[in-house]
Amino acid sequence: MTDLSHIRNFSIIAHIDHGKSTLADRLIQQCGGLDAREMREQVLDSMDIERERGITIKAQTVRLLYKAEDGRQYTLNLMDTPGHVDFAYEVSRSLSACEGSILVVDASQGVEAQTLANVYQAIDNNHEIIPVLNKIDLPAAEPERVKQQIEDVIGLDASDAVEISAKTGLNIGAVLEAIVQRLPPPKGEADTPLKALLVDSWYDPYLGVVILVRVVDGVLKVGQKVRFMATGSSHDVDRVGVFTPKALLTGELGPGEMGFITAAIKDITQTRVGDTITDERKPATEPLAGFKPSIPVVWCGLFPVDAADFERLRESLGKLKLNDASFHYEAETSAALGFGFRCGFLGLLHLEIIQERLEREFNLDLITTAPSVVYKLHMTDGTVQDLHNPADMPDVVKIDRIEEPWIKATIMLPDEYLGGVLQLCTERRGQQIELTYAGARAMLVYRLPLNEVVFDFYDRLKSISRGYASFDYQMDGYEEGDLVKMSILVNAEPVDALSMIVHRSQAERRGRQFCERLKELIPRQLFKIAVQAAIGGRVIARETISAMRKDVLAKCYGGDISRKRKLLDKQKEGKKRMRQFGQVEIPQSAFIAALKMGDE
Ligand SMILES: Nc1nc2c(ncn2[C@@H]2O[C@H](COP(=O)(O)OP(=O)(O)OP(=O)(O)O)[C@@H](O)[C@H]2O)c(=O)[nH]1
């Protein structure tokens, strides 16, 4: 057990790509956690996708041993946090297990939207914050300007910010010294009943469920019988250790320490993040303040392209769920797409990552339906229903009013792109709250309906600002909206997978786009096909795919006119039949393309 005064628990917070993982690697390297051979780049990002996309998904923790300038050895527990807004709940859970944060800001870029979002969370958790300016090796680095910006925009004293290059390793020692000198040690009692925070858990095929803990009071030991206070289940602890980043068994964890335990738990649903772990025989009376559960805000349908893959999809979703409690799924059937699942995500990036993992790790070909947010339907009988699948929309006469989720978005961008971005926000029904400047960068705060953002807002923002705008949001309550269900009909048959909830003011534009697009995507057939967008029984847009004229006369040279007429009549008859009974064959590729359709 380490003396509390020699422990520092901290996390690194940053906007995406400002160099958080690179700095973590340097700190691990400097403290000798791994030798050069083991020191792959970005050791903390364990999943392949994370490595490739360069984003950190699962929070991880690493124990470092650091011999400080005062000659004493300190235990530094580093919690890695994901930078993206979709994983904000993971950020907040890791922050609540630490006393301080290192705020990394790219000195060539400055403060960005996620820098702000993360720093506010750290402040909410009463963190001591050490500003660090990274990438000062770049010719474009302007440390003085960025320091000023940190003071102006965040209101944090940046006069003693540490200037580093995580890439070259410059000044990493100064960061370690700042951690020891400026961050407070944890508080806690060894002799009181055990209280440990369940920070994270994941399923390991060999060890079962691995639980990441932060001990607040008492001691957690191998052989102890522990109780999870929220779920009420009891387990025998069989391993206790820390990550260095390699797993190292220590047998016990004292107050202020972070590490992992295993207890032969097979089912991850028993380990609720934010739960308090206590001693079964000598339990604590009060649990620790836990975390808010993460609630999915974006839903979409996932269907296998090949129906035979359905069972495999079910198994794969089950496996993913083992390691990602924030992801939800339930079975769904669609007339157009067959058997599949309705899945809930924390945001669009989360959706994309799960979809990619399914396709890559489990080798599945998938169709994703248009993402939808969760609407609150106030029914005329006084009940309230959550709607996350447009196909389940009840009869409108039974609905009194519909509420949709809004967000408060912060967008930071160079001011030359301001005009285009303002226009985009207005088109998406945004309400401007604030427009301020820090140097040549504008900071925009907007309220926007989430439903206008899930579609392709982020892509549009990036293209309008040539990649220079940064974006972050938080949920900002529900509000009544004039929302309608728009159906897409192909030869008068509604195609369930293509229906969506839209604001009435946007319906016509969206409907027209969809019809035009489908007209291009559905191949011509022997009969005429109508593609319509409709609200209730009213058609708001229509396109016609003309029939392919099979040349029945081709083989009939010369001959008498009556014979030709007979053939043509027969053809007409056949066409009629097709139109009457026949089902339009819409190729799967047309669905996929229509669903991927952006908002041009
Ligand atoms: N020139 C220079 N590049 C750096 C420095 N630190 C990091 N980079 C580069 O910046 C990019 C982003 O670094 P990461 O460490 O992946 O950033 P991150 O903040 O961890 O990103 P996420 O994990 O996605 O949140 C990488 O290409 C790094 O090589 C630095 O000090 N100088």
Image (cartoon, grey):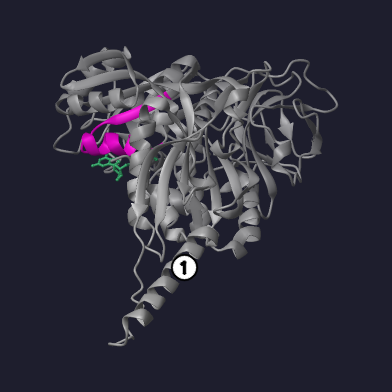
Name which residue lies at 86% across and 26% down.
281
SS category of the residue bearing label 1: helix
Eyeballing the image, is 582 above or below 393?
below
Name which residue lies at 41% across and 51% down.
530
The percent coordinates of residue 595 (x first, y second) are: 42, 48
**The residue positioned farthest toward the right in the image shown:** 281
The percent coordinates of residue 213 (x first, y second) are: 63, 32
Q: Quadrant of the C terminus?
A: top left
Q: Is mark 1 within 8 Å of ligand 1?
A: no
The percent coordinates of residue 465 (x first, y second) are: 21, 34
Residue nearest the viewer, comparing 53 with 329 = 329
Ligand 1 placement by image quarter:
top left
Residue nearest the viewer, comparing 585 with 422 = 585
Magenta stretch? Answer: 455-473
The reply to whether residue 378 is visible in this rendering is yes
Residue nearest the viewer, comparing 417 with 21 = 417
Give the residue pinned by disc 1: 573
Residue 137 falls left or right of residue 579: left
**Magenta stretch containing residue 465, yes or no?**
yes
Eyeballing the image, is 152 above or below 599?
above
Eyeballing the image, is 262 above or below 376?
below
- Mark 1 is surrounded, within 10 Å at the Cα level, by few (under 14), some (14 to 19) or many (20 or more) other residues, namely few
Q: Quadrant of the N terminus?
A: top right
The percent coordinates of residue 296 (x first, y second) are: 56, 33
Mark 1: amino acid: Glu
Looking at the rendering, which quadrant does residue 393 occupy? Answer: top right
The reply to whether residue 35 is visible in this rendering is no
Looking at the rendering, which quadrant does residue 148 occupy? Answer: top left
**Magenta stretch containing residue 517, yes or no?**
no
Looking at the rendering, which quadrant does residue 69 occupy? Answer: top left
Residue nearest the viewer, comparing 542 with 57 = 542
